[in-house]
Image (spheres, rainbow, N blue to C red):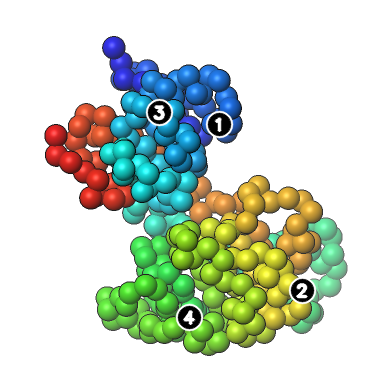
Amino acid sequence: MKKKIIAYNRVEKPVLKDLQNKYDVRFFNNVDTKNNPEFLEFLGQAEGIIGLEMPVDRELLDQAPNLKIVSNVSVGYSNLDISEMNRRNILATNTPDVLTDTVADTVFGILIATARRIPELDQFVKNGEWITEAIGPEYFGVNVHHKTLGIIGMGRIGQAIAKRAHHGFDMEILYHSRTKKPDVEENFNAAYCDLDSLLESSDFVCLITPLTPETKGLIGKREFQLMKESAIFINGSRGKTVVEKDLIKALQNGNIAAAGLDVFEREPIKLSNPLLQMENVVTTPHIGSSTHETELRMSEVAARNLEAGLQGKKPANLIDASVWKQP
């Protein structure tokens, strides 16, 4: 009898097809995991879960007595109750490294688009408003090169952003993270500093931390008030790392000049959100890793993690290796 697997949300078709050839796979897309009868019935028999953003908490785990592994198709894992999974000896995996360069490209692209007002001026042209030979200074942006970039969170993605900033744009790099990174300091001439100093000194502030209890609401009213009035804030981490109402007020009050946002407190963002009415805010729909190549690689890595766990082998990308017990 084939092992039963739940696939949830974004599992790329070639990978899903391969899994279906090996296992009894049931695919669900954005269902109510607490109340959907079909999902709950299959969950009671499933040995593995693979997918994106399914909330895996105590209530769900209570209804999954056969579960051995949850394989996230993402680098983030704030949807997983790791301590509860560890208590039940259920493996948790993610897909680090695969999306590092893609997310760094996205974040830097948003930074440039915000600084040079590219989405706003794209619409300006398409609306037929470009009626003179040259635009006036009211439409000018600001330089990126040779400016100071403050990076909050210097993991793999933070380092990839620093690499682009240093080698491509000759930027001065400041960073704040849980630990100092000597290699980053040497390779990119970066300087470690406390959070307040980074906020006060940076022309661009880039937030790229994971969402944890410590980073939830990390940037709020006080932090925005510390930034330069000319500063541009970029969030490529998770929406809840920022107090969104404070960001809105900071933009409305001119505490900061602009923002580029790939993530939001609530996703999808409501059309009534004031951020969508501001010309000095660039918004994208959480597209950090959204290229065909990267999404396929993430699904492939997640599938390898899943199959290893189902076969009693140690997955390559265990989130907490301490839970592994050699069979």
Query: Which residue is at a point 40% across and 58% down the rendered structure image?
Result: 101
Q: Secondary structure at mark 4?
A: helix
Query: Which residue is at a point 52% across and 27% down the rendered structure image?
Result: 28
| Type of amino acid under label 2 | Gln
Cα gap from disc 3 to disc 2, whole angstroms: 47 Å
| Type of amino acid under label 1 | Lys
- Badge 3 is on which residue? 64
Residue 177, position as x, y percentages in the image: 39, 73
Cα gap from disc 1 to disc 3, whole angstroms: 12 Å
- Badge 1 is on which residue? 34
- Badge 2 is on which residue? 252
Residue 289, position as x, y percentages in the image: 47, 50
Residue nearer the viewer, 196 or 288: 196
| Type of amino acid under label 4 | Leu
Q: Are marks 3 and 2 in contact (CB under 8 Å)?
A: no
Disc 4 or disc 1, which is closer to the eye? 1
The crowd level at tag 3 (other Cα within 10 Å; few <14, some 14-19, many 20+) is some
Residue 46 is at least partly visible in this image: yes
Q: In the rendered image of this protein, does residue 133 appear above or below residue 191?
A: above
Lower sequence index among marks 3 and 2: 3
Q: Are marks 4 and 1 in contact (CB under 8 Å)?
A: no
Lower sequence index among marks 4 and 1: 1
Query: Where residue 195 is drawn, which disc sits there?
Result: 4
Query: Which residue is at a point 34% across and 30% down the rendered structure image?
Result: 67
Cα gap from disc 3 to disc 4, whole angstroms: 42 Å
Instruction: Tell whether 132 sits left or right of 89.
Output: right
Cα gap from disc 4 to disc 1, whole angstroms: 39 Å
